[in-house]
Amino acid sequence: MNARDGEFTSATGLGPGGPADAGERNLAPATISRHAPASPQPAVGRAHPHESARAQVTGTATYVDDIPEVKGTLFAAPILSTVAHGRLRGIDVAAAQAMPGVHGVVLAGDIPGDPVLATFVHDEPVFARDTVQHVGQVAGLVVADTVMQARRAARHVKLDIEPLPPVLDVREARAKQSYVLPPVVVRRGEPEAALSAARHRLSGQLEVGGQEHFYLEGQVAYALPLEQDQWWIHSSTQHPGEVQHWVAHALGLENNAVTVECRRMGGGFGGKETQAGHMAVWAALAARKFGRPVKLRLDRDDDFMVTGKRHSFAFDWDAGFDDDGRLTGLKIAMLANCGFSADLSGPVADRAVFHTDNAYFLGDVEIASYRCKTNTQSHTAFRGFGGPQGVILIEAILGEIARHLGKDPLDVRKANLYGVEERNVTHYQMKVEDNILQPLIDQLERTSRYRQRRKEIAAWNARSPIIKRGLAITPVKFGISFTATFFNQAGALVHVFTDGSVQVNHGGTEMGQGLHTKVMQVVADELGVPFERVRCTATETGKVPNASATAASSSADLNGRAAQFAARKVRDNLAAFVAGLDGCGAGAVTLRGGQVISPKATRSFDEVVKAAYANRIQLWSDGFYRTPKIHYDKATLTGRPFFYFAYGAACTEVAIDTLTGESRLLAVDILHDVGTSLNPAIDMGQIEGGFIQGVGWLTTEELVWSGDGKLATHAPSTYKIPATGDVPAHFHIELWPEANREDNVGGSKAVGEPPFMLAVSAWEALRDAVAQARGDRQAPLPAPATAENLLKALGQPRAAAPTAP
């Protein structure tokens, strides 16, 4: 047992004395170097370039659609519903089948296995059958010789649909008790009594929109039939294991008949966690029917219409607080727009409940979560996974309290921070043991010159009649682990070849976030070899089975540690072998800088590997890791769902044009906690990208459904993500200089999702600017804060300013 890591390491099969027969030692004394050069720096902690960066910028990195098609490959295109809700009475495919190049169609009757997808809730059909549930629901496929032939023919398929009234609004859904899952209530203390006794009380509503993933590489899958009813699926997916399960389920096969491979994705952000499985299932069904390989790649418009988004939320809240703005009672109703099926809405809504506290202690509190069924796309995972929706709500409430009391919002936020003893337990009963909120925020307040800038902005706004500025600091405390506890496990394989080169394979997937690079760094250091000697191969279900999704910001934690353990077993084998040669204990042998060093000699790693192979020493191994300490009750949402918290804070300054509603980011200062960074360059990139993506969600990315349930914003012409011009000239990021207090790989912390929520500071700064422009302490601004919504917020009737208590 390794005391530090709390996991078993490999038995080498060699005792302290090494191999029993010294005659098999094929390492001659003449090959020993006793004066090795100084070892280079470790790989972990250095800013190594992304392992695919050069291939990506030169165009040689392979994505699914770049794979050369096997001879005879056909192409599929989806047949989409044009009605939000209705009875499907028939499908007329005659016109489509008569078109050039068309081989036929695939409908629900062509499914040999279960016609319902293998989701946890088992509530989503593979193809629409008796009813359609949203505009863009897939009723079948057209299969043709070329992509464009298939797409053109799909538009000529006629669906006979009897319209039914759709439910498109979450408040209507709640009134009709239209839910994909039952409501969940988390409660602590006596919130009603606390609200009644509160010194001050405010209530309100907040509407927060969804978000399109807008990955550069759209959804795509390529299904190849193999011999003996076996299948190879190339899928752009964050969860190859789930794709494997879904395809096997639909084909009526066991999982061992299906292998899923993903070398990399051109972005995922959660949109390819479950919903990549649809493409794979559809492509596989078409390949089975026609006995030929089939590729299915959605174009951008169809991708918008078919796939789910970030869940939009509507909130009702009632807050009691004291003269300092400290919360004394809180009741919240969360209405999550889940779309027509459950997908991942349960855990997304759970995490919104978990993160409603963000950085703040909630004493007497009740949070009721309603998982509303509507006739839209089935919404799904998105970076933050419900966390951003919970965080923005509590920040909005504290902002309202500060304006009501006439206090600086940062002071109100500080008054509510988690502290010690009675104020360090979350509303879901997890103790906050690694709290660095106060010193982190204090440092950012100083380095960003927050207090001085607030005075400068007030002076600016007093003399500027049209352009108004705003400023805000908001923190983040984000729990790291899958809330579905069983997903917190990972496996990996490490192979050392006889020339000393190393190959690692693990269950995580690469979507540009640098996971493979970090895992390679960990393995390089564990074996003591240069980073350049390690390669990471494509994620494949036939190598590491039952792997969890690459999600929840946990992939470097899980897969990095699993790969470390696999490499450690090989390292221990080599150390024991050398110890037997030199008559010392295995613990006295170290591997670093491409050398294997014992008290008697220093040898090159390559030489030792060759000799070990000749002596039949195992040079490959597996590693497995499961996150310790976590547990919680899914029924009550109480326990310890997270291994640790990642922290951060952002100070954002904005400007708005009160005549046009246009807004700009002027300056951003971020102080973020990644523990001891495995790769500072990658982590900084994740912080930058996460923040800007969050700004997009809260300012420009607006999803609009028409009254008949059609998504009107379904292309880059109508849906606006941030561009390089939206990045402020002053964009300063610093990393908090403290290792993870929990025993995580390399002392690091997760970085994928937490920075996204730092963008709430931009939205709060816009609300600050609106309130200063109005002059009445009111900021009736929903999210996203588009130009239109800003103009509405600026132009609403002005209420009398509240009097100071």
Image (tube, helix red, strand yellow):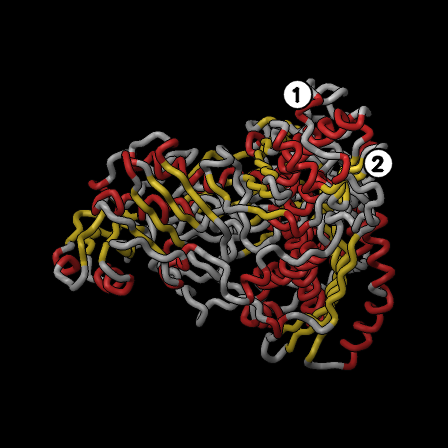
Report which quarter residue 790 is drawn in.
bottom right
Residue 190 lies, with reference to residue 514, above or below; the image says above
Q: Quadrant of the N terminus?
A: top right
Residue 692: x percent and y percent? 63, 63
Q: In this rendering, does residue 188 appear at all?
A: no
Q: Quadrant of the C terminus?
A: bottom right
Disc 2 marks a residue whose amino acid type is Val
Q: Which mark is residue 692?
A: none
Residue located beneath label 2 in the image = 420
Nearer to me, 309 or 14? 14
Question: What is the number of callouts on the image?
Answer: 2
Residue count near mark 1 (Cα–Cα under 10 Å), binned few <14, some 14–19, many ≥20: some
Determine whether, in the image, residue 432 is placed left or right of residue 143. right
Nearer to me, 551 or 389? 551
Residue count near mark 2 (Cα–Cα under 10 Å), binned few <14, some 14–19, many ≥20: few
Identified at 55% across, 27% down, the residue is: 635
Report which quarter residue 630 is drawn in.
top right
Residue 62: x percent and y percent? 47, 57
Disc 1 marks a residue whose amino acid type is Gly
Identified at 33% across, 59% down, the residue is: 708
Q: In this rendering, does residue 579 appear at all?
A: yes
Can you tell which of label 1 and label 2 is closer to the viewer? 1
Residue 574: x percent and y percent? 70, 31
Determine whether, in the image, residue 589 is placed left or right of residue 391. right
Nearer to me, 499 or 585? 499
Report which quarter residue 771 is drawn in.
bottom right
Identified at 26% across, 47% down, the residue is: 286
Q: Which type of secondary structure does the marked residue at label 1 adopt?
A: loop
In primary-sequence order, the first of circles 1 and 2 is: 1
Identified at 73% across, 67% down, the residue is: 731
Q: Which type of secondary structure does the marked residue at label 2 adopt?
A: loop
Q: Which mark is residue 13?
A: 1
